[in-house]
Image (cartoon, rainbow, N blue to C red):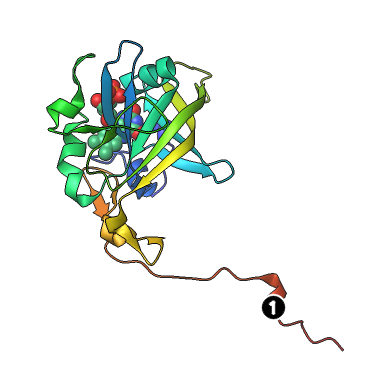
Amino acid sequence: MFYEPAKGHGLPHDPFKAIVAPRPIGWISSINAKGDVNLAPYSFFNALSTHPHLVMFSSEGEKDSVVFARESGEFVVNLVGQALVEQMNASAVDAPRGVSEFDYAGLTPALSRMVRPPRVEGALAALECKVTEILEPKGLDGKTGERFVVFGEVVGIHIDEAVMTDGLFDIVKAGTVARLGYMDYAAVTETFQMRRPRWADTKPAKTG
Ligand SMILES: Cc1cc2nc3c(=O)[nH]c(=O)nc-3n(C[C@H](O)[C@H](O)[C@H](O)COP(=O)(O)O)c2cc1C
């Protein structure tokens, strides 16, 4: 099949997010100027560079995570492993501003080291971030104000020793959960390795 998204897909559900999958889940904790704490999952989330470590999450509408990150200039990305997947889902509740999703989801905040927003206690890794910029990307209609992308630089990284194997972060032990389309999620239960080719290792082609 082929369709133009602007004209509709004619399917029971939009397949877009099932195609762009799996997506990592940035479980974002943030704090506002008053000290209210917020927690919510964002699967429009990713890392975008290593030097420095930059990450981004995108909010459809100006949600609390954006407002809080703008106010404090900080946020924390908590890793979602299988052990906390129900709590992650609970934290997506549309709680009124001022109600902490930590309490609603039965989670305990843990102190961060470099930023004010707390981490999720029990999250097997967390990235403490400082906001670098917030953009409002346009669609072809030129409209802004409908999505907000928060970029941040990672200034501190926590890893639970339990998920380190021989000095490597062990994603299978962490049971990292990814968002798929529809109501679907995936957990990483196995991995495989490939080495990137290097041009220098290529045999020169015979000439003559
Ligand atoms: C797994 C998962 C991923 C989500 N990803 C996004 C996302 O990328 N962008 C978004 O705007 N909402 C996303 N949501 C919905 C928000 O988590 C939800 O609207 C939440 O209430 C926002 O909280 P906040 O206003 O406290 O930031 C997601 C929900 C779930 C369960």
Q: Judge from the rendering whether residue 194 lies leftward or rightward of residue 29; answer left or right.
A: right
Question: Which residue is at the front of the view, 42 or 81?
Answer: 81
Give residue 113's quadrant in the image: top left
Q: Quadrant of ligand 1?
A: top left
Q: Judge from the rendering whether residue 32 lies leftward or rightward of residue 148; answer left or right.
A: left
- Residue at 21%, 38% (x, y): give it: 88
Question: Which residue is at the front of the view, 206 or 201?
Answer: 201
Residue 187: x percent and y percent? Answer: 25, 55
Residue 197: x percent and y percent? Answer: 61, 71
Q: Secondary structure at mark 1?
A: loop
- Residue 110 in sight in this render: yes
Residue linked to disc 1: 202
Residue 48: x percent and y percent? Answer: 52, 42
Label 1 CA crowd tier, 10 Å (few <14, some 14–19, many 20+): few
Farthest residue, direction right: 208
- Residue at 14%, 26% (x, y): give it: 103
The quadrant of the picture occupied by the C terminus is bottom right
Give residue 106's quadrant in the image: top left
Residue 205: x percent and y percent? Answer: 77, 83
- Residue 93 in sight in this render: no
Question: Which residue is at the front of the view, 179 or 193?
Answer: 193
Question: Mark 1 is on which residue type?
Answer: Thr
